[in-house]
Each structure stands twice: as structure tokens, then as C-alpha cells.
Image (cartoon, rainbow, N blue to C red):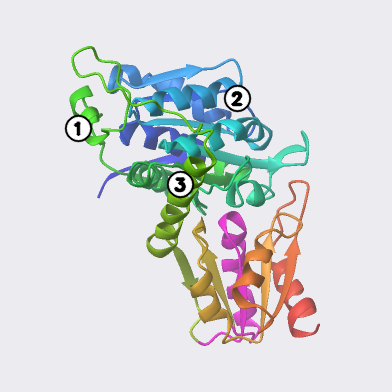
Amino acid sequence: MGELRLMKGNEAIAEAAIRAGCDGYFGYPITPQSEVMEYLMAEKPHERTGMVVLQAESEVASINMLYGGAGTGKKVMTSSSSPGISLMQEGISYMAGAELPAVVVNVVRGGPGLGTIQPSQADYFQAVKGGGHGDYKMIVYAPASVQEMSDHVKLAFDKAFQYRTPVMILSDGAIGQMMEKVELFDPIPRRTDEEVIAACPWASTGRPKTRNHNIITSLDLDPAGQEKVNLKLQEKYRMMEQNEVMYEEIMTGDAEYLFVAFGLSARICQKATDIARAKGIKVGLFRPITLFPFPTLQIAATGSRVKGILVVEMNAGQMIEDVRLSLGCKVKIEHFGRFGGIIPSPDEVVKALEQKIIGG
């Protein structure tokens, strides 16, 4: 068993970054994710592993520092919350176009605008549909526990380098702030410069004797060349859809109804499932863990066996679009959501199931 600690979700992300061999963290404070940087500053990872931690002057500066670090083949990461991630969208699109690996954490707060510092899931469209410009996508993980906040950091770095792409961890203010027991994974040593050069032949290292003359850019003014780049990216995204889908099913074997929820909402729905079962309602839970690639085939297979589906989100209805695309008109699908940082209770979810699906 690995080392056990009681940690906030934001702290677990920060500690996981150190243990994952992250070379550099560049960020800017914003509630409710500021503890990520605060933990890193207090922990002084440059003394533990040599990891650089820097507070940039803005979120725009942060993401461009990631661009530079990733261009040299280094493991780099940033974290922010909704408005801050909005400011990073141009840089994320640039990195996707230049095929640069990085980890971006979004601890979501309510919006639009400055909104509230309370938790929300209203950044689903921004993360999954590509909030920046152009035809790009990222792998997007949706942790539902503090343990997954830690585990997904290591996984995100692995997949970022496997596919040469930015990877997003889409959390929320509640999971970022809550404290739970975490089993930490064993530290991964930071790679030497020689190991980086060997593993990332595409990187521009700037070393005089081993200089790589690759130009890291997303620019190609020739339409044919740019189309070639886009076709390559789309093929990569198809590979992700084939190989990187993650999901969880709870009590779906005999289910007549289905909750579909991610992140914090899935935790609430798990308790709602128990309450509904105690009332004699056979309901199960389908939890997408990767929001891209979305588990389209898997939810279609499970959802086609039930009478109705309630999609539960802390937003006005975003993931429900992908659920409906997965199933078409084969089954009744309704949405239940709360806004403004209000977290729905399990009893509210059961009541919505009874009203919108069973009795609707």
C-alpha cells in the first residue's frame, strides 16, 4: 500500500504533480483552486525534485509558459478555475495545434462571468467541445473523489505525452476543497535532459551540441499543409476514442431506470441510487470518467435497456446533449440540475427521477 494522507482535493493534485515528475508548474491564484499553488509553494518541490513553481502575472502568461516548457519536452502543468481557464483558451488551442503535451486542471466555479466561487459543472462545453478556436479536442478526465484527483494527474501526464496533446482534469470547487483519505502513488523520478531528448525527438532543446532544429508552431499558411495537420489531429482523436474511454457502472445489471452523471454529481447519484432502491425503484448509475472521449457506445448499450434516463449535472444541461446523441430517440432522457453553487441532495435527485421520468 502507498502512503496514506488526509488531504484536500487541491492538495492531492499538487502532491501528485510533484510525484509524477512534473518539471514545472506555472499558474495564477483564483478561488476555489488557489490551494494547488499554495501547497506547491509551501512544499518547495525544487528542493525535493528540482521542480520549478512560478506564479505568473496572469493566466495568459501561465499558459504561454506551458507552451514554452512543453516545447522543450518537459512535463508542465497549470491549474485555474473557470474564468481563468477562459483566458487560457487561445494558448490551449495553440498547444493542441503544435501537438504539445501538458496538463491543465480546471477546478470549476459557477458562472457565467465572475459568477460565484461555489462549485459548478458548467464548463463541460468549454472542456469537451474545445473552448478555444479550431477543430481540436483534449482528453478530459472528471474525477469524483480526492483519490481520483491524485490518480488522474499521473494518468494525465502519461496520456499527454503518449498523444502529444494537452489533457484537462475537470474538477469542481467541492472536490477541490473537500478532505478525504488518499493513497499516494510512489514518486516517479524527473527525467534527465538526456532522457527528455531521447523520449521527445520533436522537442526544441536549445542544447548547443545536441540542438534540435524543429520549429514548434501551429502555423501553416499553406491550405494543403494546414489540412494535412488537421487530418493528422483528427486521426489522433479517433485513436483516443478507440483506446482511452473510461467509465463506471453501478447497479446497472437489472436497472429499469438510469442516472447519468459525472464528477461530484455522480457521488450524489450513487447515494440517490441507494435511496431509490430502498423505495423499490430499480435504478442504476452510469458515470463517464472521460468526458472526451465520451463513452458513447457503452452508454448506448446500457441506456437502451432501460425505460428512462435522468442526466444529473450542476449546470443547465450540457452533458445531456452527448447522452442524447449516444441514444437518439430510443429512450426518454431528461435533465435535472442546480445552479449558482447549489449542490443537489440525493433526495432531490430521487424526486426528480420520480417526477420527470417515472411519472412524467
Instruction: Classify mark 3: helix, strand or loop.
Output: helix
| Mark 1 surroundings within 10 Å by alpha-carbon count, few (fewer than 14), some (14 through 19), many (20 or more) | few
Please provide percent x and percent y for residue 116. 75, 38
In the rendered view, tell whether residue 338 sits above or below residue 29: below
Query: Residue 127 location, x and y as percent?
Result: 59, 47
Whichever of labels 1 and 3 marks the residue nearer the N terminus, that label is 1
State the CA–CA distance, disc 2 to disc 1.
Answer: 31 Å
3D distance between C-alphas at marks 2 and 3: 31 Å
Q: Which residues are magenta?
A: 254-282
| Residue pointed to by mark 3 | 228
Q: Is residue 247 above or below residue 136?
A: below
Q: Which residue is mark 2?
A: 59
Give the secondary structure at mark 2: helix
Residue at mark 1: 198
**Residue type (three-letter) at the residue carrying disc 3:** Lys
Residue type beneath disc 1 = Ala
- Verify CB contact (< 8 Å) between mark 2 and mark 1: no
The mark closer to the camera, 2 or 1, is 1
Could you tell me how far apart the alpha carbons at marks 1 and 3 are, in whole angstroms?
Answer: 26 Å
Q: Is residue 170 left or right of residue 354?
A: left
Taking the spot 60% from the left edge, 43% from the top edge, the residue there is 134
Q: Depth-wise, is mark 1 or mark 3 nearer the camera?
A: 3
Question: Which residue is at the front of the view, 187 or 100?
Answer: 100
Question: In the rendered structure, are the residues bearing label 1 and label 3 in contact, judged by CB atoms less than 8 Å apart?
Answer: no
Please say whether residue 103 is one of the residues in the magenta stretch: no
Q: Secondary structure at mark 1?
A: helix
Q: Left or right: 44 with respect to 230?
A: left
Image-based side of 52 in relation to 48, left or right: right
